[in-house]
Image: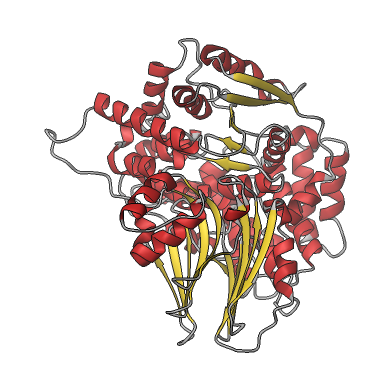
Amino acid sequence: MCGLVGIASTQHSINRSWLCSGRDTMTHRGPDDAGEWWSDDGRVGLGHRRLSIIDLSPLGHQPMRDEHRGLTIVFNGEIYNHSELRNKLVALGFVFNSQSDTEVLLAAYAAWGEECLAHLNGMFTFALFDDRQQKLFLTRDRAGEKPLFYHFKDGTLQFSSELKALLANPSNPQQINSVSLDCYLGMGFIPGELCILKGYNKLPPAHAMRFDLQSGKLKTWRYWKLPELSTFTPAETKNENELLNELETLLEDAVGQQLVADVPVGVLLSGGLDSSLVTAMAVRRSQKVRTFTIGFPGHGKLDETQHARKIANHFGTVHTELMAEPTTADLIPQLAEQFDEPMVDSSMIPTWLVSNLVRQHCTVALGGDGGDELFGGYSYYTKLAWMEHKLTQIPSWIRNIIARTSEKWLPVGMKSRNYLQGCHIDLRNCLPLQVAGIFDATTRRKLMRNVPNYNLIAEDIYRNRTPKQQDIIQRVTRMDFQNYLSEDILVKVDRASMMNSLEVRAPLLDHRLIEFAFGHVPSHLKATLSDKKVLLKRLAHKVLPPEFEKKRKQGFSIPLNEWLKAGPFRELIWDTLTRADCLFDQVMVQNLLNGQDRGFNNGERLFALTQFELWRQHYRVGL
């Protein structure tokens, strides 16, 4: 895992001084080594910070150069099938100097050009400059595990793994994109190519980008997409046992590939379904599996050490229980700085705690991310299925009255308000933003009433990003995979783990498993009116101990509402949101604060506003 930064320009005179300082804002991503390379004409510069995982020798240094073919690369991530690709490339006549997967990437591009992406199994972002063609090729992995920000203006492209590296260039603007802000407040994340700063973009997952230095043209395209669910005849359709066996084979192979590293590797074992299945597959591929569980003493159901202990004892892993110390409010501003874009999800706190503790024992850890989106694990999936089943029996004019009345009269944070607001949505082809969102349109209008010309756009963007599948489970799992997973879950894991120089891998996001889940698993084996993760639970019944609690679902969370009753967390949030220069309307802020004290569930909303304000203050960003 690493951090990369670079610049390419049609101009012959560019500012070179910021590249190293930008690179070194990401030292946490790569504390082991640093490098810089410039083209002979000074129009292309690449910088890199290295966290050594595969081939720890200096031969893995980046930027990596193939002088014979005129290729230079900076790479962030891991190519899990690099050994298999190396063998194919050797058969084609390529000679390798190292065991690094970076060198395999260089050779893969030399052999197959931009089509090399179809051969890669991994999590990655890389930028590769081709001297001969005078083109820069950039890309991002299929699920979006690794990030890439960029700024393109007047024939100059700047890019980096983290936004803060681009902000090291003093000539770059720092102004809020109001469309992105409305998405942040409405959806809880900033989707797709949008970025919180005006003039900047993110390269979306499964996309590639080519910058031609001769023409000055920048082109982006999608190189991979989710498959459609197979529509075989009954005779051709795989039965449940065939699907179960294929899932088991794919997961075991994905875990086996991701256990490979030249540094200590562990498994993040929460005791939940996904991480327990990863552990079960790991012990098949390794004689000594190290598992780690984080306990939260004094927080009851949030402490899952006993469940993880059962799994570890059953499989005989080398198990370590790490106890999280009481968290101080001082961590919140640090996280706001690290996350580049403001982040709604308060589970960034336990994610950071896990990463910080596990890094003391391992450099690489396998986790269970992706299981909910691929196999139907969120509780609101069953609620949406129930709503679709029941609401079609109620006339639309009645549902519209319920939705409008709920939004107007029920307090923000009141239980079931979000679901009632979504009653008017036609669940046969749409999804209600209110169920997954943070602030509805009415609340956002009040929060931003002091901001001139503020547009409510999140609902339109959400609607346009909603997949077209008629089946609601197919629709919502695809929506979450392409949005919530890539823009919240994976961002949280990447930033919190890299802040601690820990590489976290996600076997469930092997692209073969993704294609299996969306291309072959029918909805009734994902989520129904009464159950979730149906197929994964079948696998759990087969490979996990009988006493494993398959119906238990505990999110990775903190006792936020408890912390907001009194103490330093409450003081930080109250002080931040009541500052004179706070962007948000003070009457609405006070209503949210008062509602929290009255028992309404506004903790995550208050956290979202606080994170935004702390981020804005740190980076001195204006409207």
Residue 106 location, x and y as percent? 46, 61
The residue under the point 58% across, 70% down is 150
Residue 525 in the image: state x and y as whole percent.
Answer: 33, 30
Considering depth in this image, is 426 or 489 the residue closer to the camera? 489
Residue 49 position, x and y percent, is 66, 58
In the rendered view, would you say 122 is above or below 444? above
* On screen, residue 198 above or below 495: below
Is 304 in front, or is 46? Answer: 46
Question: Is residue 11 left or right of 118 when viewed as pictured?
Answer: right
Quick check: 213 left or right of 618? left
Image quadrant containing the C terminus: bottom right
Image point (76%, 52%), residue name = 610
Identify the colour scheme used: secondary structure
Q: Residue at x 83, y 41 (%)?
A: 569
Q: Quadrant of residue 94?
A: bottom left
The image shows a total of numbered marks equal to 0
In x, y percent, where is residue 95?
41, 57
The answer to whether residue 114 is visible is: no
Question: Does residue 186 lie above or below 600 as drawn?
Answer: below
Q: Is residue 389 visible?
A: yes
